[in-house]
Image: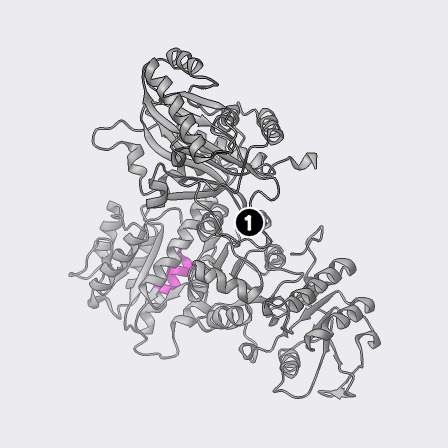
Amino acid sequence: MSEFAAAPDLSRFFAPRSVALVGATDDRSRFAGKVLLRLRDFGFQGTIYPVNPRLREVAGLPCHASVRDLPQAPDHVGIVVPAPQVLGILEDCAARGARFATVYTGGFAESATDEGRAMQAQITALARRTGMRVMGPNCNGLVNFIDGFAMTTSGTVATRRPPGRVAVVSQSGGGGQVNVMWRAQEAGVGISYEVSCGNSADLTVLDFIEFMIDDAATDVILVFVEHIPDGARLLRLAARAAAREKPIVMLKLGRTEAGSRAAASHTGAMAGVDAVCDAALAQAGILRVDDCHELYEVAMMLATRRWPRGRRAAATTISGGNGVLLVDHGAALGIDFPDYTEATRARLAELLPRLGSAGNPTDVTNAAVGKPGLFSEVISAVTADDNIDVAVPIFTLAPASDVRQAVEAAQAATKPVAVLWTGGCSDDPAFTVSSIVAAGVPAYRNTLGCLKAVRAAMRYGEFLRGRTRPEAVPQCPPGMDLQRARALLDQASRIGPTPASQAREGGVPTLHPAGAAQGSAPRGADGAAILTERVSKQLLACCGLAVTREALATDAEQAVELAASFGGPVAIKIESPDIAHKTDAGAIRLNVLGASAVREAFAGVIAAARAARPQARIDGVLVQAMAAPGVELMLGLARDPVFGPIAVVGLGGVHVEVLRDLAWRVAPVAHREAQAMLRELRGYRLLEGVRGAAPSDIDALCDAIVRVSWLGHQLADRITELDINPLFVYPQGVRVVDALITTTGRSEATH
């Protein structure tokens, strides 16, 4: 990942005045020959300098022996030479004053060899040392449809197409240029820029995304990635894009563990856990899709820059079956098809043939086919309805005049319209779905693809409306004594608590399998440690969370006195910095009542601890007032290698391991985001109250989520994991019943 202080100005990267091509050749069957062919045939108007010490002339142009010999410093240099020669060529480029270089050559980190990784590291170091920015290695170049500059081998740019306002940023060459750019253009979507950056030794997808955000010619940014190089920067860029109302649509590969491994072997980088990635992207307003065609189909809707006000859609059709199919798919995607207003129903009754239906979906019947102006009037009436946010006119085999009415109505409407044309044109074969898209109207061939695009536009509209509300802005809640919390961590680290290598079962779900995070060391090797339950709760109490009444007893009589002072049954638990698994060690007793029972429990947990861990340090026994039963939740923190501190909530107890009913967010979260997390849980109804149970205190629970998220955000240098399990939720308030915190050891400030 590049560590330049400021994002580069990529204007001359995409629109250079002069270009050098190292390894240039007239042989069009070779990679460099194809690059030169595309460069010339695409319409580049600047100066081209072929560089090849073995040739005097290439493509009718004087050929130079070295970049150092060029008559001027080129803005951009393309490099197509064997991998061992690349570093020397880059040194020449930097010495001559080139601003940018693109390395097409493979055989670097993606080769998964020590030699390849070392050579790529040298490229990174050179870029940082010289200030010359480098794309690649192992990439397929770029295309600028606006200025007529293509430096790539791809046959997808053999014909220069009219530019559009959708940009494509990809780590993969074939994925970006063929699966996304070329197919989007075939579907009628105009492209502004396409860039395939490969291994990203220096410039990354984030640099190109930032350029597209600032570029006046781009409205929608499509991203095809195998890994995200810097989650925090991506979230900052997403906020900038949202402020400009520029949607980012991302196809992030590696949803499965097997897919993550494949992505890592291809790019030399590791991927984060997918559930976290999903949540982080949604939290930032980045629309994640599942396939390449979904990328550009969603872009069709977003390029209109008409954001739906809600999730209410209407359909008009001449086929009742297609209308029912649309509603079925829409329901599965969370799209509603409400009734029209009385005024709209009356207007449709005037317009429709005798057998037509003024309901939603609106069946205009075959009797409407070929009727001048009818489809336009119907669509106009539907889009004017206050109950409707998006209109979807459906056509099967239709005359061009009918579909053109829908296109004209869509262009005139103030609300989004997506044309679903499942058949073809009965009288004009040249009039196609792609020609409709090229005219600026979203048009689709299949129902599910259409509705996924509509849903994405609805989600983006919701995000834009919600992001500026006060309750959507994370704010540190009152009563959080973070200074005291840090002091407790410092004190615990001096005492030397439990090594973190003692993994705790049933806690915060492990984000990454052993060895998954690149460069990870064995846990505990850096001083990481697990705090005891008592210390963990003290720290949480500093943050304003209610914890159980408890105290430490060093002998049985003290335990009896404490239990009597609490009144009612108590829990007796071992307090040892060396025993994280109290239940596994048998060193816990619940619902203990009475002096003799407390004495017996005290002796029992001590004996069990000694048997389980003979060398364990034992500080005493924790006497804890039994908490009244409530709805059990798990609330915690984890550290993701891409996005940093992550808040997680789910059903507690054994449900964490069995059901995996969890919701994740990048910390810190706002109260509104905490509410959204809870609503994502399949078990959310338990909080609302079922079978006569009183509803839980959702506000108090959201407040707890917010507080824990701020703890993770503010003490990210100290806390790697936090596990509250269970957290009891009551009709009024919440209470921490059990908790453990994993720390990094000493504060970074003390190193």
**Position of residue 98 in the picture relative to residue 109 (left or right):** right
**Position of residue 738 in the picture relative to residue 82 (left or right):** left
From the top left corner, tell me how far across and down residue 539 is, in percent. 53, 27
Compare residues 7 and 280 and report the one nearer the observer: 280
Is residue 743 shown above or below 158? Answer: above
From the top left corner, tell me how far across and down residue 614 is, in percent. 48, 33
Compare residues 248 and 302 and report the one nearer the observer: 248
- Position of the N terminus, as image quadrant, is bottom right
Instruction: Say what amino acid the circle numbered 1 marks.
Output: Pro
Q: Is residue 269 visible?
A: yes
Is residue 418 shown above or below 72? Answer: above
Q: Magenta stretch containing residue 418, yes or no?
A: yes
Is residue 627 shown above or below 428? Answer: above
Q: What residue is pinned by disc 1? A: 641
Tell me where residue 172 sits by quadrant: bottom right
From the top left corner, tell me how far across and down residue 660 is, in percent. 36, 45
- Position of the C terminus, as image quadrant, is top right
Residue drawn at the location 65% of the way across and 88% of the way down: 27
Residue range (magenta): 406-419
Tell me where residue 24 sits by quadrant: bottom right
